[in-house]
Amino acid sequence: MIAVVEGDTLQRLASRCNDSMLRLERISKALSAKHQSLAATWSDSKYRELGAVVNDCSSAIATVTQTLSGIGRQLAELTSYIREYESVNFSDSTGSEGTSRDGVSVHSAILSAYAGLSESSSDGAVNQILSQYVSRSLSTTQQGWENLTGNRRRFDTPIETGSSMIAQQGEVRGFQGTCGLVACANLLRLAGVNVAERDLVTYASATRRQDGSAYLCRVDLLHPRGSGGTTQWDREEILTHFGMSSEFRPATVDNIRQAVTEGRGVIASVHAQQLYDGVASRENDLHAVAVTSVVEGDGQVVGVYLCDSNNRPASYYPIERFEAALNHRTDLNVTSTIIR
């Protein structure tokens, strides 16, 4: 992989590490300052609970910034070796002007620097940075139809697919409303980009939308149940950052059927209580899910399979129940490319 990494790319990555580190430090300071400013008028148990959350967040941010600092230094060192490697004239055994090492020793230095990068991150974060979150793009889907009983057929293998996806949201303390973020992570996993819910929460909670109006997910530590929530536009920007292009399509069963059977990733917005219990709710119960499969009977869609981050990795719903719960006011997030 190093052979195709250019110095300019590594330099941009090092700069991005530094920018992210500074942004996280500002967030940590702002959280602490806001908590301290509340002390004059608020001193009950809830205030102390909030203090524990703020301390946990600050500690987590400190860990991340320390890791980013180390990665940034290693990337800077690797960049210098790559620059030197790029300047080597391999056709001239005497070397070229400005080159202080021969190609072999420079290459060895690159490998050594890369080894140091790998050791600095046990969870593979460096490999992920260097790969720039390249999602899979296929010319045609690798999935197909499976015949069922009763003249029905099912697309893909939703049970097996669900077993490899994230099925429980709320990994990050203070961010419980992360269904949309988990759905994004699951589409990325289907496309070969292995990210965790925590990765998306870290990015979305610290990055503002392109118009600067708000962060890419809701950040409300006083109400963690809704913290982490996203809109269709947020999800589009998040997927783009992690290397996956996507588009909006009207929320209809026909559009879902077409996208899923083409091998595209699909995120739909549903009313959770209507989906689970068949009862309309007066509360804001919107919930984002990844649609992983459809079932047909006599050429018509009769049901869908969802990977639902409410601990339902491969849930089947008759089409009448699903369509009643489908939020038609929010477009589908559909990957622009075929990913499976």
Image: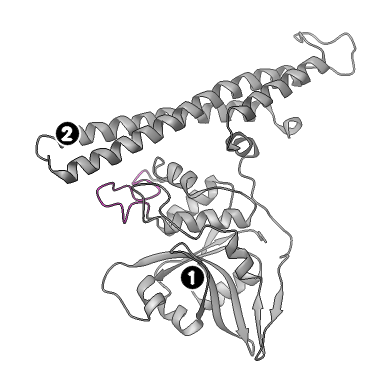
| Residue 37 numbered mark, or none | 2
Q: Which residue is mark 1?
A: 250
Please give the name of the residue rendered at 30% of the width and 52% of the height, measured from the top-left corner: 224
Q: Which residues are magenta?
A: 212-228
Side (left or right) of 9 relative to 269: right
Most extreme residue toward the left is 41
The reply to whether the magenta stretch includes residue 185 is no
Give whichever of discs 1 and 2 has the lower sequence position. 2
Q: State the CA–CA distance, disc 1 to disc 2.
A: 45 Å
Q: How many marks?
A: 2
Using a 10 Å C-alpha cutoff, classify the residue at mark 2 as few (fewer than 14 neighbours), some (14 to 19) or many (20 or more): few
- Label 2 is placed on what type of residue? Ser
Q: Quadrant of the C terminus?
A: bottom right
Closest to the observer, 78 or 4: 78
| Numbered disc 1: secondary structure | loop
Magenta residues, dominant SS class: loop
